[in-house]
Amino acid sequence: MAVALVVGSRTDGITVDEPVYISAGYRHLTALDFRLNPETPPLAKMLAALPLLPLRLHTPAAPGEWGWIYRFFHENSASRIIALARLPAILLTLLLAVLVWAWARAEHGPAAGLAALALAAFHPSLLAHGHLAATDVPAALGFLGTSWAFRRWCQAPTPRRGVIVAVALAAAVLTRLTAWLLVPSLALVAILDVRRLPPAERTRLLRGLGVLAIAAALIVPTLIWAAHGFRYVPWPGRSVAEPMTRDLGPAGDIVARLGSWRALPEPYLEGLRFQLAHAVEGHRAYMLGELSEKGWRTYYVVALAVKNTPGFLLALGLAAAAGVKRRAWRGVGWHWLIPALMLFLVVSIGRIDIGERYLLPVYPYAILLAAAAVPQVLTWRRGRWLLAVVLALHAVPSLVVMPRGYLTYFNALAGGPAGGHRVLADSNLDWGQDLPRLKAWMEHHGVEEVQLGYHGSDDPERIGLRARDLPGVHLYPGRPAASPFEGVVAVSPNLLLGIVEPKGPNPYPDLRRRAPDDRAGVFFIYRSP
């Protein structure tokens, strides 16, 4: 897994969100400036920027937004920045795999632990996002780490373990705002645990839950304030708060009330407001050849079906078959099933259908549920052979796709990586990461220069790629093409499929009706005339 993550870090270009997160994290750490990217909590961004502190980077004068981010990256060495900023993500991903292994082994034995580790180590989505300086895998670790700490507390509800639960929860909600779903999830798990205990133990656990709730109510807000430098505004004399312009339901009322009380830092509350509004308003999304501004309730079901290996889907099927008997869901099973289901339902109900990465915190729970079935499967006739087939159908597709990059993985239901654009796109396929693969294709085919329609945050000049620019959405200034669609043309799928609108005239509707002459990574290649 470590090898795959390092290879991915070296071969994937800069993705859309990474410059935002890294630049914001650097400002958070070095200046306690939280004006950049308040939409996302600061912890994962600060961890990504931590290796940059010894470099003494040049920082542009005034933070704007995208212009400042571009200057910060490219007035320094963008390649060195991205390489260092991805190191914490790799370490956190490996830590997540260790936690999955340790928890499965502790609950269900060595065979379950090894199966869980194999499912994690070859999971295409964990490998795709596990080397990126983003919030997705850190969020998965935050979810699972909090659940693990709570399980340990349930087994022995001591004050020290209660503090660990509260600290883990604080780290989770400082990484991804959806981690607040852990509060109702753990409460429901506690109710189920209490119901199955004898009266004496039930009273003891209820008393402990009261103490745990008080500890969390004190520790979590304190750590949120500490992460923001114990300052309400993001920068002295500056505000990032947007007014509550529409009804955001009970959650919006809570955020507004917290703001009026100044109960949490303003950037954190603004992030909550933004994400609630985003979930209500929606985001342009693509699925099965159609575009929608409001998304689909079935989006993440489709993503689950096509972005996972056949072996992983079979493992989930075996877990469901083994868990039909009631005893399989007693105890620890609820600690895995309830947070996974709650997160899956919430992201499905919301209207932010921009990538399977929103499901990443679900996968470690699913892996643990699948691993829990291993001892039972081993008692079946030819159970060992069945497990071997499951792991082979999981590991082999993952290894095969490594040279193309794990972001583009799709299984046979979608026609493989080459057919994935017919089902899903956006960060499921095209997150701006494939400029290095386009350059490699050009060198292989003797192409010196392309006309480039690019959506992303990378820069062709960073890797020595010669291009004339078609209308796109990117940070670098570019060199506009005099006559569109002459010579060799390379277009990002997100532009071609209409998911993002280019700056200026959109020349792609006619082009998308034409079959591409080739593919270079995710890019569609056309030769004209």
Image (spheres, rainbow, N blue to C red):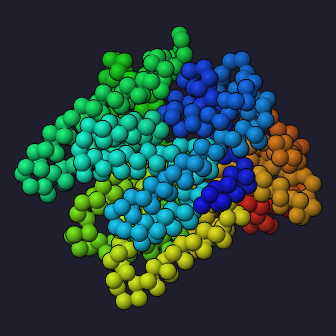
In the rendered image, the quadrant that contains the N terminus is: bottom right
Residue 49's x, y, as percent?
62, 34
**Residue displayed at 36% across by 50% down:** 148
Q: Give the quarter of the image for residue 289.
A: bottom right
Residue 104's x, y, as percent?
39, 63
**Residue displayed at 72% across by 38% down:** 81
**238 left or right of 132?**
left
**440 left or right of 133?**
right
**Residue displayed at 52% across by 19% down:** 234
User: Residue furthest toward the left?
Assistant: 199
Q: Is residue 9 above or below residue 331?
A: above
Number of callouts:
0
Residue 29's x, y, as percent?
59, 26
Residue 226's x, y, as percent?
45, 24
Q: Nearer the viewer, residue 504 or 269?
A: 269
**Residue displayed at 15% across by 39% down:** 207
In the rendered image, the quadrant that contains the C terminus is: bottom right
Q: Is residue 493 above or below residue 222?
A: below
**458 left or right of 114?**
right
